[in-house]
Image (tube, grey):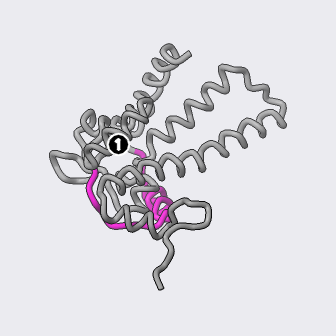
Amino acid sequence: MTKNTENNSGFFSHEMFYKLANRSPRFHRISAMLLDHFLMCFFIIPIAILFTITAEILGFKLLDGMRFYVWILIFFLYYNKDFFNAKSPAKRIMGYQVINRKTGKPATELQCFVRNFTIVAWPIEVIVGFLNPERRIGDFLANTKIVLSEKEKLKTIWTDLKRTKLKLNYIGIIIIGIIYFFGLSYIIP
């Protein structure tokens, strides 16, 4: 008896997804991008909502300008999803890592931040990622590429966070982020 790979609603099962992902590096890479987007939204947006509700309950009235800065913080976290060991949550789960094209070593925090500048053109990034699974537009800007790596559990992020020490790069990333988002505030209405 053959195993049915579709559930009753007509969508692909997890087994079919993994079979397809293992056969096609393009599908695997795009699924990692989509998983990253889902995970980041799943974790960050509830934090922003909770922050807004808490501020309102405590009597802090968030003006439109203040809400804008909360959203900037959300995007800043999203832009730095590859910050620890050049692996975002989805890259850890699916076995990818961002590396420096010249050295072959894990990309620096600044390179990871720069490669995510193009997230404002996310649909275009997905198309480029489909055409070239190793590099998307942001990788060309940061001189990085994606390579296969050891799969990890999400809890390894906490281990990396505990080992992190303040570096000059971090201050530079914050300054660049402030300038970048300040510039975007004039472009995006």
Q: Residue 73 appears at what percent x and percent y?
A: 56, 34
Please report the bounds of the magenta region as a residue range: 146-166
Q: Residue furthest bottom?
A: 1
Instruction: Determine whether, in the image, residue 26 is placed left or right of residue 187.
Output: left
Query: Is 154 colored magenta in this rendering?
Result: yes
Q: Residue drawn at (60%, 49%), measured in percent from left and top?
A: 42
Q: Nearer the viewer, residue 1 or 54?
A: 1
Residue 120 lies in what quarter of the image? top left
Instruction: Determine whether, in the image, residue 69 is placed left or right of residue 50.
Output: left
Q: Residue drawn at (49%, 70%), measured in percent from left and top?
A: 5
Residue denoted by label 1: 112
Q: Residue 104 appears at what percent x and percent y?
A: 19, 53
Number of marks drawn: 1
* Crowding near the residue tagged with mark 1, few <14, some 14–19, many ≥20 C-alpha atoms within 10 Å: many
- Residue 6 seen from this side: yes
Q: Residue 173 appears at what percent x and percent y?
A: 40, 34
> Is 66 located above or below residue 171 in the figure?
above
Instruction: Determine whether, in the image, residue 147 is placed left or right of residue 40.
Output: left
Q: Residue furthest front?
A: 1
Q: Nearer the viewer, residue 67 or 2?
A: 2
Q: Residue furthest left?
A: 102
Q: Residue 123 appears at what percent x and percent y?
A: 42, 35
> Is 170 located above or below residue 151 in the figure?
above
Q: Residue drawn at (30%, 50%), measured in percent from left and top?
A: 98
Query: Is 33 colored magenta in this rendering?
Result: no
**Amino acid at the residue labelled 1:** Cys
Element class at badge 1? helix
Q: Nearer the viewer, residue 161 or 30?
A: 30
Q: Nearer the viewer, residue 50 or 139?
A: 139
Q: Which quarter of the rendering shows the C terminus?
A: top right
Q: Residue drawn at (37%, 33%), measured in percent from left and top?
A: 124
